[in-house]
Amino acid sequence: MAFLQARDAISGQEGRAYATINGNVEEMFYVKTLEATVEKQKSEMKALGRRGTQHKATGWNGTGSMTIYYVTTRFRQLMLDYIKTGKDVYFDIQIVNEDPTSSIGRQTVVLKNVNLDNVIMAKVDTESEFLEEETNFTFDDVDILESFVAPTN
């Protein structure tokens, strides 16, 4: 009987993220959490002879959020450029999950055409040991460049 061994569970700290903004790749060392979700859009359909409602997928929507340590001005600058010029920036984020203790290997996912929804422009907090900020985003394409493999038992 196969089972998941604790050493094969991926540590949340064993990852990397990279942003490609205007052709420049930069490591997002300041990310605390990042989560991207795809949600199907569905339409309802009723048919003669059937009492229940049927559903058909008609599209999808990509959204995400990230909490970052308040140590970069990069996203504030992107938002300021949009405010001042109206030019919006879309960029890619590559997320790598790779725990050297695990036998399942590495997974690499690329979120394409990421667009920020909100950015904290300034912050102070006398109760906080570390300043953090949360931002939400959308994306309109995704690729899986590398996939996890089955664990060895």
Image (cartoon, helix red, strand yellow):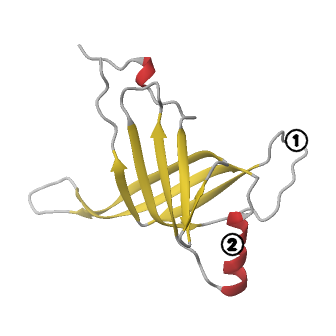
Q: Which mark is residue 151?
A: none
Q: How many angstroms separate mark 1 from mark 2 (CA)?
A: 27 Å
Callout 1: 10 Å neighbours few (<14), some, many (20+)? few
- Find residue 113 and report its horizontal and vertical position in percent: 47, 68
Q: Is residue 49 left or right of residue 144?
A: left
Q: Secondary structure at mark 1?
A: loop
Q: Quadrant of the C terminus?
A: top left
Which residue shows up at 40% across the image and 39% down it? 106
In the image, is 129 to the left or to the right of 138? right
Residue 18 location (% of width, % of height): 54, 55
Q: Tell me where residue 112 appears, x and y as whole percent.
A: 44, 64
Say if 17 sits above or below 104 in the image: below
Relative to 137, is 5 on the left or the right?
left
Question: Please, what is the three-letter code of the amino acid marked with disc 1?
Answer: Glu
Q: In this rendering, is residue 117 above or below 101?
A: below
Q: Quadrant of residue 135?
A: bottom right
Query: x%, y% of residue 55?
Result: 24, 58
Above or below 153: residue 96: below
Circle 2 sits in a helix, a strand or a loop, which is it?
helix
Q: Which residue is mark 1?
A: 127
Q: Residue furthest bottom?
A: 85
Q: Nearer the viewer, residue 8 or 67?
A: 8
Q: Disc 2 residue type?
A: Met
Question: Looking at the image, which residue is at 74% across and 63% down?
Answer: 73
- Residue displayed at 87% across by 53% down: 124
* Residue pointed to by mark 2: 79
Disc 1 vs disc 2: which is toward the camera? 2
Spot the residue most to the right: 126
Q: Residue at x 61, y 83 (%)?
A: 87
What quarter of the picture does the N terminus occupy?
A: top left
Using a 10 Å C-alpha cutoff, classify the residue at mark 2 as few (fewer than 14 neighbours), some (14 to 19) or many (20 or more): many
